Image (spheres, helix red, strand yellow):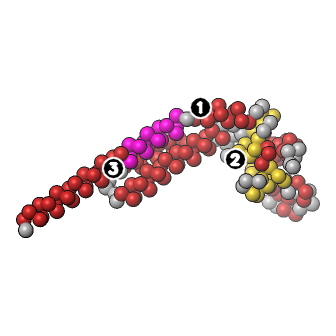
Amino acid sequence: MFAFFVIEETRENLYDNCMNYISLILRSASLTAIAMLAATIPMRKKKLDAKLGKCLIPLSQKKSTLFVAVLVLAPLIIVFQWFRVFQFYIQVILCLSAVLAIELAVRDKVLGSKCGVYENAIIVDGRLLLKEDITALPTLEYEKESESFNGENGDFYRKALKIVTEKNGVIFVGFSSEEERNSAVEIIKNWVK
């Protein structure tokens, strides 16, 4: 009877040690992935420059501290797991969430630094819309007569643009000023198929 308890206790210790090693590998891989994602920013900018072409109109860039906040907090979520024991599936969720947060922040940082209308695309509001993907600009057809465009919320509508794309459907994008929107529309309306 005593031998059975010793074997069972040894089996539990072996399972706990195995899960500890797997958790260590998971956390280390997540921290490595975060470092690699952050290191890809210059390469992503260079690749994006090649895809976009020449800048026709630079658009105002929004200043955001989101990137710095995520860059600091996401690794802390993983480091926190060394001091607090969670079930394995919770550890997986936390690690994947931290890596995904870094990916989204890096993407936002790269696109946010390149806001403008280019030969092959427009980057506005943190979105990259390729020239060949834009199929319609429905707000241009009715905006002058629309009550919403001229009413009390008209300032919002005069700075926004509704774009229909092949891949993403209907998208609303916002500009910092009405002049910026109008100058971008002058170029984009020639792209519509």
Residue range highlighted in magenta:
26-39
Label 1 amino acid? Pro
Which of discs 3 and 1 lies nearer the camera? The answer is 3
Q: Which residue is mark 3?
A: 22
> What mark, if any, has residue 127 been given in the picture?
2
Is there CB contact under 8 Å for labels 3 and 1?
A: no
Circle 2 sits in a helix, a strand or a loop, which is it? strand
Residue furthest toward the bottom? Answer: 1
The amino acid type of the residue labelled 2 equals Arg
**SS for dot 1:** helix
How far separated are the C-alphas under marks 2 and 1? 19 Å
In magenta stretch: residue 31: yes
Using residue 143 as the reference point, say whether residue 13 is left or right of it.
left
Image position, residue 13 (x, y; %): 20, 56
Q: Residue at x 71, y 39 (%)?
A: 115
Which residue is label 1 attached to? Answer: 42
Nearer to me, 166 or 39: 166
